[in-house]
Image (spheres, rainbow, N blue to C red):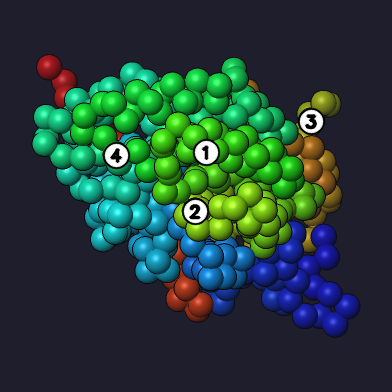
Amino acid sequence: MSVTNATGQPFSPAGFPHFHYDNGHLYAEGVNLAELTKQVGTPCYVYSKSAICSAWKSYQDAIGTRRVLVCYGMKANSNLAILNTFRALGSGFDIVSGGELARVLKVGADPKKIVFSGVGKQTWEIERAIKAGVKCFNVESPSELKRISQVASRLKATAFISLRVNPDVDAQTHPYISTGLKENKFGIAIEEALEVYQLAIALPGLNVVGVDCHIGSQITEVTPYLDALDKLLSLIDTLKENGITLQHLDLGGGLGIRYEDETPLAPMLLLGAIFKVLDQRGYQGLELVFEPGRSLVGNAGVLLTTVQYLKHNAARNFAIVDAGMNDLIRPALYQAWHGVLPLDAHKSSHATHIYDLVGPVCESADWLAKQRLLNLHENQVLALDSAGAYGFVMACNYNTRGRPAEVLVDGTKWHVIRARETFEDMIRGESIP
């Protein structure tokens, strides 16, 4: 692996400028990750604040003077420090649970910038969101619509409603993260939307304000978005003909990032294409809502892990590390790719082999990378890149393993934003009768 260019200047792995090699050492912004590891240990998630702000700016530059609300899809990474960074930037938030609502309110988020998505909202969650005064509920079924009406009526309040419709658009992504097809559990079939909107305006305690869709995740082409937009605008036309006027159009999130060799779709290209269609269809004044998650934090994080053992047999070479599928489940769940980078590229005296990077969890699915050409030695620290989204938030305590620490880097400073979980943390709440 080459870690400097021809002039010996720092090299950015996989094109991520906020994580770079300098004199053979991997840095996050101005922090040497090997030095950080000596103090924090591994496994450990490390995030770059500058990378997050840069990703946010890419949306703001694309928006310009248009009327657009960006609501960070916080299911991607919900650490309070990350949420507070977005709040300070002026972001709204896309939430999918009462717990996520509590998190964003904890950091002082503006409730009028919160949209509540998700197919299974419980009564207590609906009640808390109405009391908080969220911007709207993205409703996914007639049954949910009726329940929100009942809760709002009991509270003598008004719940603002946006129906999430399923446009039956194939986002050409992994089936586990596809959400816009008829066979997916999400949304209301677009053919049934007019009937459900008519039900919504007839129910007490509701104010119908928008339409929403989300077709999937890790999307790298503009065409699926434009296909969905065309169907939603036709629906808005039909609603208008039936006396129902909407205030906003929510196109969800799903913009992809680079993991291996993808070419991500830049927000400027996506939004430019969307604005052109809105202008052509006469909807320049309609507020646009976006719910990006992965594209704001995915490339802003790495997972640090230490090689425990190197194991060679006739079929495979294994590098057994201290991070497992309980820390980063994406490879096991989605067969996801994460680049593997040494923290110190100078230590290269050992033989190069094709390795499977595996963890200590007692499952054959416990792998982080397969068939990678690597130069490794025991006790070496590695970084798995593009781990800022759907990493820690999906971590668990399987095999009674404490979840990793989380660190936020800001220039030459770093802060532990979540302490490493201890055994006492894991058993809190358990009892022996």
Horizontal arrangement in the rendering, residue 2 relative to residue 70 (left or right): right
Q: Please identify the quadrant where the N terminus is shown.
A: bottom right
Residue topped by disc 2: 286
Q: Callout 1 environment at 10 Å: few (<14), some (14 to 19), or many (20+)?
A: many
Identify which residue is drawn at 21% across, 33% down: 205
Front-most of residues 123 and 52: 123
Mark drawn on residue 76: none
Q: Are marks 2 and 1 in contact (CB under 8 Å)?
A: yes
Query: Between disc 4 and disc 2, whose residue precedes?
Result: 4
Identify which residue is drawn at 28% across, 22% down: 146
Horizontal arrangement in the rendering, residue 40 relative to residue 61 (left or right): left
Amino acid type, callout 4: Asn
Local secondary structure at mark 1: helix
Residue topped by disc 1: 236
Query: Between disc 3 and disc 1, whose residue precedes?
Result: 1
Can you give x and y, in whole percent of width and height, for residue 395 in the image?
45, 38
